[in-house]
Amino acid sequence: MDEGDGEPQDFIRICTEKLSTEEVSQLVLSPSCGAVSIFVGTTRNNFEGKKVVHLEYDAYVPMAEAEIKKILADIRKRWPSVKHMAVYHRLGLVPTTEASVVIAISSPHRDDSLDAVKFCINTLKATVPIWKKEVYEEDGSTWKENKECFWKKQ
């Protein structure tokens, strides 16, 4: 019974502002859903023994948004019970401990939302044209390629 619950909605935002996990999770709340699963990707302070000061993200935004829409459409086919989905990604400088990506998905039961969130972040990292540069305390910086990237496997 979805009385007053409305149609499923997708929310996509690529921005330079600090991300709010609370804001993203509120977008997907639904009275017909008993589960909201959230993934928050944050900047860690180290990589392979180097101290990371911050990350810098860049993207071709129109293509990134189009690829995220494809991921969400695929999720709706794989998990038809999913209600609302939100994918927010930050661009620009992201200091340690701050979020670079927040994904929230609601569904009536936890298995579908948990599986869909995992699929979403893994597919996003493999297909969406968002690039990450790690800036180190010493030794400069490095543009990082996600090990999941489909073009790396070709």
Image (spheres, rainbow, N blue to C red):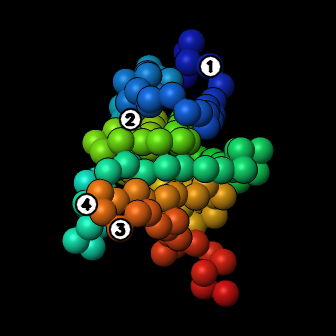
The residue drawn where x is 63% and y is 64% is 127
C-alpha separation, residue under disc 1 versus residue under disc 4: 47 Å
Mark 3 residue type:
Asp
Q: Is residue 129 visible?
A: yes
Mark 1 residue type:
Gly
Percent position of residue 103, x then y: 46, 42
Q: Are marks 1 and 4 in contact (CB under 8 Å)?
A: no
Percent position of residue 8, x then y: 62, 30
Label 1, residues with CA under 10 Å away: few <14, some 14-19, many ≥20: few
Residue 123 appears left or right of 54: right
N-terminal label among 1 and 2: 1
Residue 125 appears left or right of 154: left
In the image, 59 versus 113, the foreground residue is: 59
Q: Is residue 65 above or below residue 6?
A: below
Q: Read off the residue under disc 3.
A: 139
Q: Secondary structure at mark 3?
A: loop
Q: Read off the residue under disc 4.
A: 51
N-terminal label among 4 and 3: 4
Q: Secondary structure at mark 4?
A: strand
In the image, 95 versus 62, the foreground residue is: 95
Q: Read off the residue under disc 1.
A: 6
Q: Read off the residue under disc 2.
A: 36
Instruction: Classify residue 91 by image quadrant.
Output: top right
> Which label number is shown at residue 46?
none
Percent position of residue 118, x then y: 43, 57
Q: Which residue of the protein is positioned furthest toward the left in this rendering? A: 49
The residue drawn where x is 61% and y is 37% is 14
Q: Is residue 64 above or below residue 47?
A: above
From the viewer's perspective, is the residue at label 4 or at label 3 nearer? 3
